[in-house]
Image: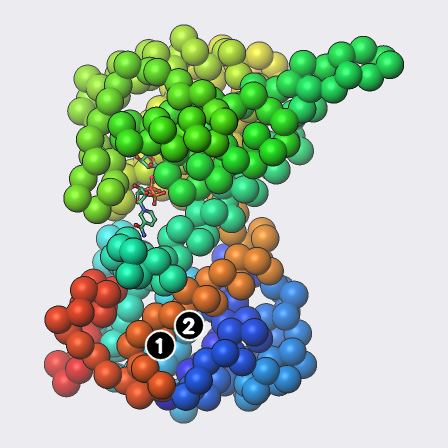
């Protein structure tokens, strides 16, 4: 199978779908990499050539599969041909028009988001690998914006008390944020509506914040959306507790739904001046009422960071992990480089979002 790796062109995306090391490890595949595709992530053309890739001007041309990070934009959609395999973050639950266009074009499209979150599919789980990057980066951004240290310091000029950090939503990103904030020396609390998370939060050395709301876990391991009454109770509890914290990282999400509003404006405004909220849910509207997706806003001395696509801000390791996920999916769909699709297989069937009748 010949696989194309285009340069990402949408929204300042700096990641690349395959890194040179991953190209070298793929057995039975020929890889065509668009010139400059890895540059922003720190992988020059020479490194791809050394790994055995062919450098091309158009990675959609003459390939059986195209692997990308972001879903295709209009120009890229126009290049995809019937029967071609496409692997990317296709946002199938929200980008329905794009999925329809892929279907009409006869593309065999696999969405990284739709890979089942099972043990067998762990190596392909790009939601987890990229959430790990986002959770780590969120703490660094928060630490950078805070006017204070995170760790406790004892110096000749006096003793500094450690910062207090709160992480709301303790899935993959949240747990990484908790671990990172702990490593930097903050005193950390975590909260999630899924009851199973309490122990995970505590095992990282953080305190589980009891907000008096306990939700349920759905079959896929995700949280069920709270009822309006539960959400109101959560907001009220948070409004009371939030002034205790210097840094709040929010990651709460329900797949395919707008982010739950956890922090009303009134609660954010009760925080001490200089406090920082980093809202990782900004992609789906934000967990804080003050969040403006893509922006950093100040309200009453509180900074609310709603920056988008944090994994792209750490493109080297984010791409390395994503490339591992993409390679594992390629090897699953085409063992030894020969496409062999088993529609009874839960990974193949689960990840596929459009397919031509012939597939
Ligand atoms: P996610 O990004 O969809 O959501 C982030 C977190 O927000 C979740 O923990 C969710 O419970 C929480 N949340 C939702 N509403 C909330 C609210 N109102 N208040 C507070 N928190 C709220 O989740 P994710 O990080 O993608 O992980 C979801 C699940 O998938 C977890 O159970 C995780 O362990 C599981 N998972 C399993 C595997 C595997 O088995 N291979 C791999 C990765 C993740």
Residue at the front extreme of this rendering: 203
Picture coordinates of residue 142 (x, y %)? Answer: 59, 32
Disc number placed over residue 73 in the picture, else none: none
Q: Quadrant location of ligand 1?
A: top left
SS type, badge 2: helix
Q: Residue at x 62, y 64 (%)?
A: 40
Q: Is residue 307 visible?
A: no
Residue at the top extreme of this rendering: 240
Q: Residue at x 24, y 36 (%)?
A: 223
Picture coordinates of residue 60 (x, y %)? Answer: 42, 82
**Would you name the residue on which mark 1 appears?**
331
Picture coordinates of residue 230 (x, y %)? Answer: 22, 19
123 relative to 300 in the view: left or right = left
Q: Residue at x 59, y 70 (%)?
A: 38
Residue at the bottom extreme of this rendering: 62
Picture coordinates of residue 41 (x, y %)? Answer: 61, 63
135 relative to 71 in the view: left or right = right
Residue 307 to residue 298: above or below: below
Mark 2–mark 1 contact, CB under 8 Å?
A: yes
**Would you name the residue on which mark 2 appears?**
327
Residue 144 to residue 245: above or below: below
Q: Is residue 268 visible?
A: yes
Q: Residue at x 57, y 31 (%)?
A: 181
Residue 28 to residue 259: above or below: below
SS type, badge 1: helix
Query: How many other residues sit within 10 Å of disc 1, few (<14), some (14-19) or many (≥20)?
Result: some
């Amino acid at each position: 199978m010949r696989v194309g790796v285009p340069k990402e062109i949408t929204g300042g995306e700096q990641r690349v779908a395959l890194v040179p090391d991953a190209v070298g490890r793929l057995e039975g595949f020929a890889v065509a990499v668009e010139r400059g595709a890895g540059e922003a992530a720190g992988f020059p053309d020479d490194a791809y050539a050394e790994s055995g890739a062919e450098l091309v001007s158009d990675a959609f041309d003459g390939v059986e599969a195209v692997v990308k990070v972001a879903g295709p934009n209009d120009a890229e959609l126009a290049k995809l041909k019937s029967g071609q395999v496409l692997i990317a973050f296709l946002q199938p639950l929200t980008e329905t028009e794009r999925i329809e266009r892929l279907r009409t074009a006869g593309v065999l499209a696999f969405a990284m988001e739709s890979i089942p979150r099972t043990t067998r599919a762990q190596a392909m789980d790009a939601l987890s690998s990229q959430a790990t990057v986002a959770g780590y980066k969120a703490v660094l951004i928060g630490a950078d914006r805070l006017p204070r240290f995170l760790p406790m310091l004892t110096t000749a000029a006096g003793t500094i008390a450690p910062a207090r950090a709160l992480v709301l939503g303790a899935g993959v990103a949240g747990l990484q944020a908790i671990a990172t904030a702990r490593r930097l020396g903050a005193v950390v609390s975590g909260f999630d509506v899924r009851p199973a998370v309490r122990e995970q939060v505590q095992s990282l050395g953080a305190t589980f914040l009891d907000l008096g709301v306990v939700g349920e876990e759905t079959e896929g391991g995700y949280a069920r959306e709270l009822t309006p009454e539960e959400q109101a109770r959560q907001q009220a509890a948070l409004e009371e507790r939030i002034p205790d914290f210097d840094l709040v990282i929010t990651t709460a999400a329900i797949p395919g739904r707008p982010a739950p509003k956890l922090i009303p404006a009134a609660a954010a405004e009760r925080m001490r001046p200089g406090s920082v909220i980093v809202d990782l849910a900004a992609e789906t509207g934000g967990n804080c009422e003050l969040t403006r997706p893509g922006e950093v806003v100040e309200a009453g001395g509180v900074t609310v960071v709603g920056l988008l696509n944090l994994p792209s801000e750490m493109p080297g390791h984010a791409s390395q992990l994503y490339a591992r996920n993409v390679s594992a999916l390629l090897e699953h769909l085409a063992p030894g480089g020969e496409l062999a699709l088993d529609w009874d297989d839960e990974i193949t069937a689960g990840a596929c979002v459009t397919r031509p009748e012939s597939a």
